[in-house]
Amino acid sequence: MAYDRPGEPLVLGVPRAAFRPSPVFLALVAIFVASGVMAWNGFGNVRFDVFLFVVSGWLVSLCLHEYAHAVVAFRAGDRDIAHRGYLTLNPLKYTHPLLSIVLPVVVVLLGGIGLPGGAVWVDRHAIPGRLRHTLVSLAGPATNVLFTLVLVAALRLGSAAFGGPVEFWAGLALLAFLQLTASLLNLLPVPGLDGGNMIQPWLSPQYRRMYDLFAPYGFILLFALLWNPRIGGWFFDAVFAIGDLLGLPPWLYALGLDLIRFWQG
């Protein structure tokens, strides 16, 4: 085993400390678990318990989404991504805290939409092959899809087996719905977002230059698309249809959205 300094092992040339979960991420996980227990037991203000449960769970998923991008990029050849702190699951490392954390949480509270959050900077020149570039971009949305399936399974099996308070299951249903919307949003072929970045390596040089021109405005393009009544209607029709197919009760995640707005109660 290689060592960078006495007693410090390396993983593919990177100190093992670069892979340790940050205290910020561990704190988010602790809040998520504690607030879930509080919501289950009806501790204090249940609406606030559900608020903490959903928001902390959503932030944990944002961290894991970006971690998936980073770890695939690391395995694909970008070793410097570990030195940039992206493998520590620290949400403060993912671009601007206001745009990457605060804005997605505000959108969740106001509209119940899983808006794409932070982003990791990947050294594309260090990663050979178009397929690897696509896999790096796919890793994040794939994490959201996995979370959606796990949360829906936990909801359907857990509520049937254990019963429990409807408020807890409403919060879990809302988390599943957010993951579902995030999965579809991240797979849209919008320049600068994951779905667009998946196809960018396969474009001709002419279209790639055009793509790179629009990529910095990906969020604006996304909002413009969703603001269009026809396109926004198609998107949400698809979300609701997939939610119904998975067995995600609309009334339950709607209740969750109402509960997290604890200031209205």
Image (cartoon, rainbow, N blue to C red):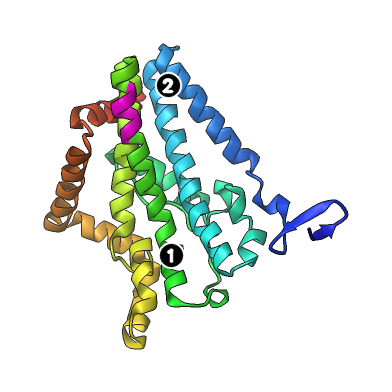
- Residue 135 in the image: state x and y as whole percent: 43, 65
x and y, in percent, of residue 114 in the image = 34, 45
Residue at horizontal 79%, vertical 61%? Answer: 2
Image coordinates for residue 240, horizontal then vertical, percent? 18, 42
Q: Quadrant of the N terminus?
A: bottom right
> Are circles 1 and 2 on residues that touch, CB within 8 Å?
no
Q: CA distance from mark 1 to mark 2?
A: 37 Å
Q: Main secondary structure of the magenta part?
A: helix
Residue 135 versus residue 190: which sits nearer the camera? Answer: 135
Please tell me whether residue 226 is drawn above or below residue 147 in the rendered image.
below
Asked if 163 appears above or below 25 in the picture, the reply is above
Q: Does the magenta segment cover residue 153? A: yes
- SS of the residue at dot 1? helix
Residue 61 sits in which quadrant?
Answer: top left
* Residue matched to label 2: 49
Q: Label 2 neighbourhood size at 10 Å, few (<14), some (14-19), many (20+)?
A: many
Q: Residue at x 47, y 34 (%)?
A: 56
- Let me know if residue 186 is in the magenta part: no
Examine the image and state in which quarter residue 167 appears.
Answer: top left
Give the side of residue 129 with respect to residue 168, left or right: right
Q: Earlier in the sequence, mark 1 or mark 2?
A: 2
Three-letter code for the amino acid on which mark 2 is drawn: Asp
- For the C terminus, the quadrant is top left
The residue drawn where x is 42% and y is 34% is: 55
Mark 1 or mark 2, which is nearer to you?
Answer: 1
**Type of amino acid at the residue the image marks with label 1:** Leu
Residue sitting nearer the eye, 22 or 96: 22
Magenta range: 152-158
How many numbered badges does the structure rendering display? 2
Q: Which residue is mark 1?
A: 135
Residue 105 drawn at (x, y percent): 40, 41
